Image: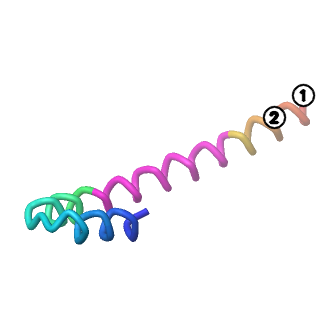
């Protein structure tokens, strides 16, 4: 994902964009991975509760 963004920015030749995205995208990736992980855990918990009952 970040590779594509970097390529686009270097192609665009803008100096402002890489800085903003460099700050923004790692945080977003962390958040997305956290949400995916949380959703997976919740699905597992729900599945086990469903099995138990």
Mark 2, residue position: 49
Residue interval drawn in magenta: 25-42
Measure how far apart labels 2 and 1 are at the Cα level: 6 Å
Eyeballing the image, is 52 above or below 8? Answer: above
Q: Is residue 29 magenta?
A: yes
**Is the Cβ of the residue at disc 2 closer than 8 Å to that at disc 1?**
yes
- Seen in the picture, residue 52 relative to 12 is either above or below; the reply is above
Residue at 9% over, 67% down: 15
Q: Residue furthest left?
A: 16
| Quarter placement of the N terminus | bottom left
Q: Nearer the viewer, residue 4 or 28?
A: 4
Residue 46 position, x and y percent, is 75, 35
| Quadrant of the rendered image containing residue 45 | top right
Asked if 46 appears above or below 32 in the picture, the reply is above
Disc 1: which residue: 53
Q: Is residue 18 left or right of residue 43?
A: left
The rendered magenta stretch, by its main secondary structure, is classed as: helix
């Amino acid at each position: 994902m970040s590779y594509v963004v970097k390529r686009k920015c270097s192609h665009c030749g803008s100096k402002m964009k890489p800085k903003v995205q460099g700050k923004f995208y790692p945080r977003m990736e962390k958040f997305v991975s956290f949400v995916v992980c949380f959703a997976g855990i919740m699905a597992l918990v729900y599945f086990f509760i469903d099995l138990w009952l």
